[in-house]
Image: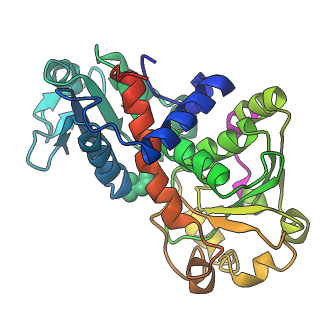
Amino acid sequence: MKRFHSLAELSHGEIRDLLALATRLERHPEPAALAGKILGLLFFNPSLRTLASMQSAMARLGGSSIVLTPGQGTWKLETRTGVVMDGDAAEHVREAIPVLAGYVDALGIRSFAGGGDLAADLADGGFREMAGLCPVPTVNLESAMDHPCQALGDWKTLDDLGVPSQGKFVLSWANHPRPLPLAVPAATVHMAAARGMEVVVLRPEEYALPEPVLERARKAAALSGGSVRETSDRAEALEATTSIYGKSWSSPVHYGDSQAEALLRRNLTDWCIGPEWFERAAPECRFFHCLPVRRNVVVADAVLDSPRSAVVRQAHNRLWAQMAVLHRLLGGQR
Ligand code: CP
């Protein structure tokens, strides 16, 4: 494997190979597999899980990591092309990334969506351009439109919990005080479709996912035998579902217009996932969320604190999934 940018770049067999390796590393540690290897971690945006689990993954495999957060103890980095750099940024990624690549064996980059221009964010150009500057293998730590480390960990969680691969998977929009990126919903809907699930995206009309996001998931479903559809009919969507994945995202209709979206969300406070959402679900239905999550806005305490909640297990599976990715990228032995 030369890079880890998206599950959509991997075949079903390659994903299954990573999942098997993740489980093997969970059961049988390999504390020297990446001895002497160094991972660079470039975070343009905050993180708890991705930062900590990547460093832990590298250490547990015998390697080490360097964390850089531009503008916080490191020069602020310019990412735009062709600009006059007379502002805050002292250095351009065109120099910084090749320089870093000389110090490390692989580089992870977190670079969120700009949130102002939907077409630009759908193209995911910011992450792709930076990865293109890097001569060593790159890992997407969440870009504008993807979060493959989360998706791989979530797939492992579904497997661990015995959620049937043909089961019904509801990705539900949930309320939030701020418009959030599309990366996790895009990665999640693709992951569940690639796993072969009956994927239902439940959302208010104004939060229909952009067509390119659905199209990518439908292509994966066509290969896996799964399906993808959207609805705003909550009762129908939740009927007999085996999984509810909660997540908030920006309205594509009001993309970049936070005031218009704030007005819209005033009437959507009932999109807080509560215990009643599970009344018509399968008895074993579990609740998933990538975290961080705002309690009693996105999801009720009664769900997060119940045995249905898989959110901590999801976060823990990030570690094993990323260890598998690093093992494959940096040449650990099988
Ligand atoms: N889910 C996730 O990526 O969490 P962090 O933003 O804390 O890394």
Most frequent secondary structure within the magenta stretch: helix
Name the one closer to the observer, 278 or 86: 278
Note whether 227 is above or below 304 in the view shown. above
Residue 39, percent from left and from top: 24, 32
**Residue 242 picture quarter:** bottom right
Residue 9, percent from left and from top: 58, 23
Residue 210, percent from left and from top: 69, 41
Q: Can residue 142 be seen in the rendering of this structure?
A: no
Location of the C terminus by quadrant is: top left
Q: Residue furthest front?
A: 28
- Quick check: 103 left or right of 244? left
Q: Residue at x 45, y 27 (%)?
A: 4
Note whether 182 is above or below 223 in the view shown. below
Name the one closer to the observer, 114 or 107: 107
Q: What scheme was used to colour the molecule?
A: rainbow
Q: Residue at x 24, y 22 (%)?
A: 105
Residue 244, percent from left and from top: 71, 64
**Residue 76 picture quarter:** top left
Query: Start and end of the magenta stretch?
Result: 207-215
**Is 278 part of what is drawn in magenta?**
no
- Quick check: 136 left or right of 218? left
**Is 208 part of what is drawn in magenta?**
yes
